Amino acid sequence: MNVLVTGAAGFIGAHCVLRLLRDGHDVCGLDNFNDYYDPQLKHDRVAWVKALAGEFPLARIDLTDAASIDELFQSHRPDVVIHLAAQAGVRYSLQNPHAYVDSNLTGFLNILESCRRHPVKHLIYASSSSVYGANARTPYSVQDGVDHPLSLYAATKKANELMAHSYSHLFGIPCTGLRFFTVYGPWGRPDMSPIQFAKAIAEEQVLQLFNHGEHERDFTYIDDIIESIARLLERAPYPTVHRDREQPDPASSLAPWRIYNIGGQHPVALRSYVALLEKHLGRAARIELLPLQPGDVLNTCADASDLARATGFQPCVELEDGLGRFVDWFLDYYPQQPAHVLGAAELQRRRL
């Protein structure tokens, strides 16, 4: 199929393009290579994909440029759009809220409009586990309400789900939203905890743990995310004809629209996560415990049973294995100065 991947130079986007090319699809990418973090990492991801799977067209377009996006749809004629481009980050949304409106709302509207003008078989777009916000019950289920976001980032992702539903209802665009849970792995974003924590530990800098390290996160390895997307590619949603009007399922609709969680389903305490990084890096962390930050969710845990029923797959990479693969990449991409690597006994002594 012809597949358009937005955010193709991003963390998930680059892995997605690689998988699609290897599966024999005709892929066109879109990315604006902005400087939210070092653009060199984005260029290096693209070079990595091309080295493993060959060349592919990659348009340098900003999501707010509606005319250029429409021209790209006109020229590539995608069967499927995988929309992964967005302004990410919970804490950054406190500093620069307009970036989230521009990219996540106006930008998504431009994608929806192009899907309307140039009909596609399936629009798959990234949502986020952050939409669950103040929900206290875990595991988070797609049948739960998500009406109390704790950050503007989360609010824009919830808005994307609503916008997609309206276009699905009005214009028959099959839309699937994916709520990702703490994705990690090689080529990850430097503003996320794996690289931030690994750098702090490797460089013997202070590692700040908010909420006094009491967070729990449902970590999801990148390969599990990509396998889920690949299986959903040709599974465009259908209207739920026999919808219970008394107790409607928030994850399905009379329109061709669906929502799925993609998460590891095994939440891990932040301190245990740090201990695994220490183990793989062979160095002890210098930890500073700090209060809860505005916008942070305390604990996350996915119920991915709907995904399993739809695709026959659910995330399966254990955190220790996934972090080992991440650290191998991290040490290769961010070469460290020679330093004494600690054994297990010394690591334990330093923690105490």
Image (cartoon, grey):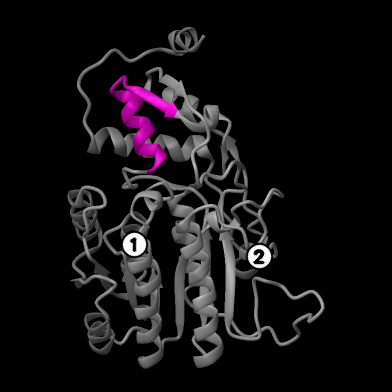
Q: Is residue 93 in the magenta section?
A: no
Q: What's the residue at 43%, 51% (across, down)? A: 222
User: Start and end of the magenta stretch?
Assistant: 192-208
Q: Residue furthest right?
A: 246
Q: Is 284 situated above or below 103?
A: above
The percent coordinates of residue 60 (x first, y second) are: 18, 69
Disc 2, SS = helix
Q: Is residue 139 left or right of residue 9?
A: right
The percent coordinates of residue 245 (x first, y second) are: 78, 82
Q: Please state which of the two labelled residues, at mark 2 or mark 1, is closer to the viewer.
A: 1
Q: Amino acid at mark 1?
A: His
Q: Which residue is mark 1?
A: 98
Q: Is residue 228 visible?
A: no
Q: Which residue is mark 2?
A: 306
Out of 80 and 300, give the one closest to the viewer: 300
Sort mark 2 into few (<14), some (14-19) or many (20+) by Cα contacts within 10 Å. Answer: some
* Quadrant for the N terminus in the image: bottom left
Please tell me which of labels 2 and 1 falls first in the chain: 1
Out of 314 and 29, give the one closest to the viewer: 29
Q: What's the residue at 58%, 84% (across, down)? A: 256
